[in-house]
Amino acid sequence: MKKTILIAILVIAALTSRQSLKAQITLEHTYDTTYQSCLFMVNLEASGVKYGIILQGGDTTIKFYNLNHSLFKTINLPPSPNNYSASRFLYFSDHLFNLDDSIEFVIEYLNNSNATYKIYIYSESGNVLFMVDGSLNYSHAFPMVLQVYPIYNTPNGTKMPIYMNTGECNIYSLPGTLYIPCCNDSFSAGMPNPLGGSINYGMSAFPNPSNGNNTTIEFHLPQGENKGEVVVYTMQGMELKRYQVDNTFHNLLISNSDLHSGTYFYQLLTANGATGAKKMVVVK
């Protein structure tokens, strides 16, 4: 009898554990994307991480939502230039092309009759900040935005948008953290290099863990590169520090005085890509 009861308890415990593990991936929110191009996420320098939805059909509109899914901002796009149509929405920022806190964005337009392109950079109000005949060098296909991944780190946890066959986009919360910075470019850790192969430059940190005021990061720029940037991120992928480096030295001394105890990531960025993010632990 006792054996039977024990087996029943173990079966219940196993089922409960399985349900608990499955429940770690939870449906957080649903966006109706039936008549929309795409849902993406972007890390605006001043305003933080937002959901974005590009609505097409008639007048094109971009809506941004906060991480709690409340509406942050709606932007009505200006009409396309004559004989051109929007081909790609490439960048969204609020401190890249000018220094106020309004959103700015890049659109690449295509003339289908002669296969020529125009690049426009707009302010949030629709003013043209920059225009040139030509196209950007990229590896993404419409309408993917260069800043995004299929899975995103955010200050509110890791999110996984999935387009449903029924036309909406479900936002799922994940229990873990993606070990790449949120909303950076396509060369980051774990992502393929469009130029072929993977990118892996040597980097290390010492002491690690560090219980002092400083950590030394050793780096080696790839052959042919003479400058780059070392960037430090939180566990959620938020940028904390950025340092310009070149080939004069191979060690960077960074201060930990403004960092709390915890785990951080550091990464080397160059014109041709980025290292895989590595861990740096601070103990105080």
Image (cartoon, rainbow, N blue to C red):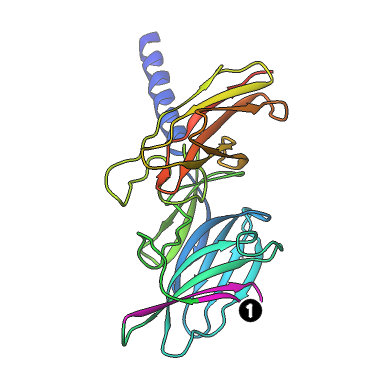
Type of secondary structure dominating the magenta stretch: strand
Residue under label 1, please give it: 127
- In the rendered structure, the answer to whether residue 154 lies left or right of residue 89 reads right
Amino acid at the residue labelled 1: Asn
Magenta-highlighted residues: 115-131
Q: Quadrant of residue 199?
A: top left
Residue 263, above or below 102: above
Q: Residues within 10 Å of mark 1 (few under 14, many from 20)?
A: few
Residue 180 seen from this side: yes
Q: Residue 68's spot in the image, x, y percent?
A: 64, 54
The single residue placed furthest to the bottom in the displayed view is 82
Q: Quadrant for residue 231, please give it.
A: top right
The verdict on residue 121 being magenta is yes
x, y percentage for residue 204?
A: 47, 24
Indicate whether residue 101 is drawn in magenta. no
**Hey, which residue is sitting farthest front in the picture?**
248
Q: Residue at x 45, y 58 (%)?
A: 146
Question: Which residue is at a point 64% across and 18% down the rendered structure image?
Answer: 283
Q: Nearer the viewer, residue 5 or 50?
A: 50
Residue shown at the point (44%, 33%) measured from the top left: 21
